[in-house]
Amino acid sequence: MAGDKAVTIFKTPGCGRCRAAKEYFAARGFKIEEEDVTSSMSAKRRMARLAPGARVVPVIAFDDEVEVGWRPEYWNKRLGGAS
């Protein structure tokens, strides 16, 4: 389904929702790029540029879309599949 599609997940260590998002996309064959916003200032700046004002993680960038927070029901609908 995903082929060579990539998703970027901006995360923090120990974030359960970030881990759930990673597992969700990995199970569907997406290439995953993780950006730790606590250890990388450049990742923090990229996240702020993509999602101004975002105060929670994960921030998920896919295609030309950015979603703040983890809502699997949204991604099921967006990607056309069940959980």
Image (tube, rainbow, N blue to C red):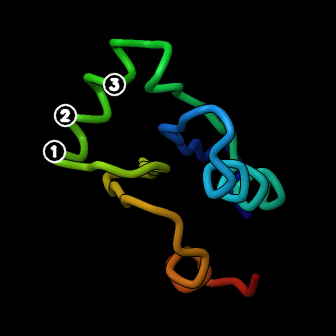
| Image coordinates for residue 6, horizontal then vertical, percent | 58, 42
The Cα atoms of the two marked residues, 2 and 1, are separated by 6 Å
Instruction: Report whether 23 appears left or right of 13.
Output: right
> Is 64 in front, or is 9?
9
- Which residue lies under the disc numbered 3? 44
| Kind of residue at disc 3 | Lys
Left or right: 20 as drawn, with respect to 48: right
Q: Earlier in the sequence, mark 3 or mark 2?
A: 3
Q: Residue at x 33, y 57 (%)?
A: 65
On the image, the x and y values in percent for residue 39 come to: 50, 14
Task: State which quadrant residue 23 falls in.
Answer: bottom right
Residue density around tag 1, few if under 14, some if 14–19, many if 20 or more, within 10 Å = few
Residue ranking furthest to the right: 27
Q: Pointer 1: what residue?
A: 52
55 versus 71 height, above or below? above
Q: Residue at x 37, y 60 (%)?
A: 67
Residues at badges 2 and 1 in contact (C-beta under 8 Å)?
A: yes
The quadrant in which the N terminus is found is bottom right
Q: Secondary structure at mark 2?
A: helix
Dot 1 amino acid type: Pro
Could you tell whether 32 is left or right of 78 in the image?
right
> Where does residue 62 sit, x and y in percent of width and height?
45, 51
Q: Nearer the viewer, mark 3 or mark 2?
A: 3
Q: Is residue 62 above or below residue 71?
A: above
Image position, residue 56 (x, y; %): 38, 51
Q: How many marks?
A: 3
Mark 3–mark 2 Cα distance, whole angstroms, equals 9 Å
Give the SS element for disc 1: loop
Name the residue that disc number 2 marks.
49
The CA distance from mark 1 to mark 3 is: 11 Å
Instruction: Look at the numbered discs 1 and 3 and tell me whether their residues touch, using CB distance below 8 Å.
Output: no
